[in-house]
Amino acid sequence: MKKKKVKGTIKTKIDKVSDSTIRRLTLYHRSLKRMEKQNIERTTSMELAESEGIHPAKIRKDLSYFGTFGCRGVGYEVSTLKRELDHILGFNKPWGLVIIGGGQLGETLIKSQSLKENNFIINKIFEKKPDQLKITTGQTGVFSINQLEKKIDPLKDHIAIIALPHREIQPIIDRLSKLDIKGVLYIASRAVNTPKNMVVMNQDLSLSLGMMTYKVLEKRG
Amino acid sequence: MKKKKVKGTIKTKIDKVSDSTIRRLTLYHRSLKRMEKQNIERTTSMELAESEGIHPAKIRKDLSYFGTFGCRGVGYEVSTLKRELDHILGFNKPWGLVIIGGGQLGETLIKSQSLKENNFIINKIFEKKPDQLKITTGQTGVFSINQLEKKIDPLKDHIAIIALPHREIQPIIDRLSKLDIKGVLYIASRAVNTPKNMVVMNQDLSLSLGMMTYKVLEKRG
DNA sequence: TAGATTGTTAATCGATTAACAATC
DNA sequence: TAGATTGTTAATCGATTAACAATC
């Protein structure tokens, strides 16, 4: 797979890019969003670097995997670069989310401005006991987890966010993998068997807190 | 700073260990917790590797930064290795948490088994309008954010978790930095100025979702 | 003892950074 | 034009993996 570069636009096919690069692209993207809001029209790799605490050369390198978006001697146009990153990260088209087992989380995410900005829409919430859930969901439907297979439409529901206790996660992931859902993010301290046909990611507060306590101890000596 | 090794126990002083290593230690730790629950007494780097999807040599290397915990030809004793990791990551003594602006999150965390297991205790919850919050907190107090300075005791409240909208995060971090609180984890899409005297980490669902959508797109071609 | 698995060194691989020609 | 900043190559640095002596 060879690189194809198209000046001023994104490459069509790309060599495997590292996870760290992708994570940083999301950082650049959020800085650009902020700049756009502040009506800043132009920026440089040095400015972006500073606002996210990253080496400027790294930013230029990261971007270079996808094309050439800047202008020598001048820098980057904020709106253009943001749009390109929208495209690369997939924020240019809407993503349907379903929340499984996190009604409260669902309500929070429905209100979340930053998800809206990035074109994420909460389509459905699944709960063990949907009747007992007291939240304001607007027109977002709340269903029983039993109805997962009946209610999920993989054409509209692209990503599932699972917020359930430990032991309940694996079975749900197994059920989802049969539905051709594209991605699953689960919020729990748990390693799971990840089916090959979807992207499974884990967001875990305990793991982050573990890093935190290590760093605090390290700092204090 | 030179390495000191103490056979069978942890080193007293350690060369700077990379973040990736620390993150993996938390993974090993959670696998060991699971094994302990399942009454598995002994494990090997290969077994641990498999359950977290990591190269076995990497595990041995990661551990070697802190000491020698295994037995050649035999492997590792689950309970011993877990206890050592408890110690390294700081899970051997209790950490007091306060939640700022995430009452609902607070309730969830109070119930969280995995936080309890790792010796994290929710001491206080701060809300803009504590009266309007309808949650079950047990004996955990809910206070107004105005009272932050009055109610936080840095000797007991070690780590703050902030779940507030964008613009409200920086001022809170600035206020916390004056209180000698040791660590802050904020849950939002935002880069903040991090005071030197504390460890500040960011957990952001949007960033994770950005990685997710990239990977989904990459997979689909 | 023979077999297994660690701890560690050395080799490899990949990611970061420095440097600079290209060029606005 | 002179100054600035990109895009990219080359150099450096660090992390991962292979390999194996040590040893249970």
Image (tube, coloured by chain):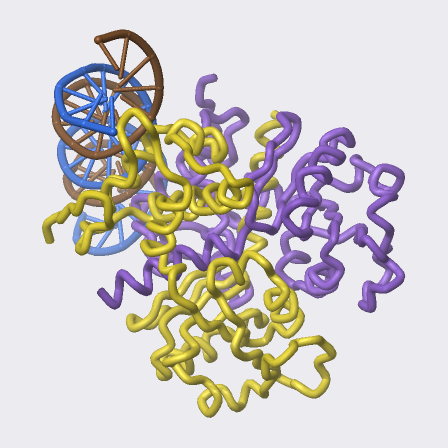
Chain colours: A yellow, B purple, C blue, D brown
Residue A71 is situated, as x and y percent measured from the top left of the image, at 28, 33
- Could you tell whether A212 is left or right of A47 in the image? right
Residue at point 33% right, 28% down?
A74
Residue B100 is situated, as x and y percent measured from the top left of the image, at 74, 50
Q: Can residue B111 be seen in this view?
A: yes
Judge whether C15 appears above or below B53 on screen: above
Viewer-side residue, A84 vs A131: A84
Report the quarter where the C terminus of chain A lies.
top right
Residue at point 35% right, 39% down?
B61
The tally of labels here is: 0
Residue B165 is situated, as x and y percent measured from the top left of the image, at 66, 51
Q: Can residue B74 be seen in this view?
A: no
Judge whether B29 appears above or below B180 on screen: below
Residue A145, quarter of the rendered image: bottom right
Residue that sits furthest to the left in the current view: A2
Viewer-side residue, A128 vs B120: A128
Residue at point 47% right, 31% down?
A53
Residue A183, quarter of the rendered image: bottom left
Judge whether A167 appears above or below B181 on screen: below
Viewer-side residue, B2 vs B206: B206
- Could you tell whether B49 is left or right of B9 in the image? left
Residue at point 35% right, 36% down?
A76
Residue A87 is situated, as x and y percent measured from the top left of the image, at 33, 56
Residue D9, quarter of the rendered image: top left
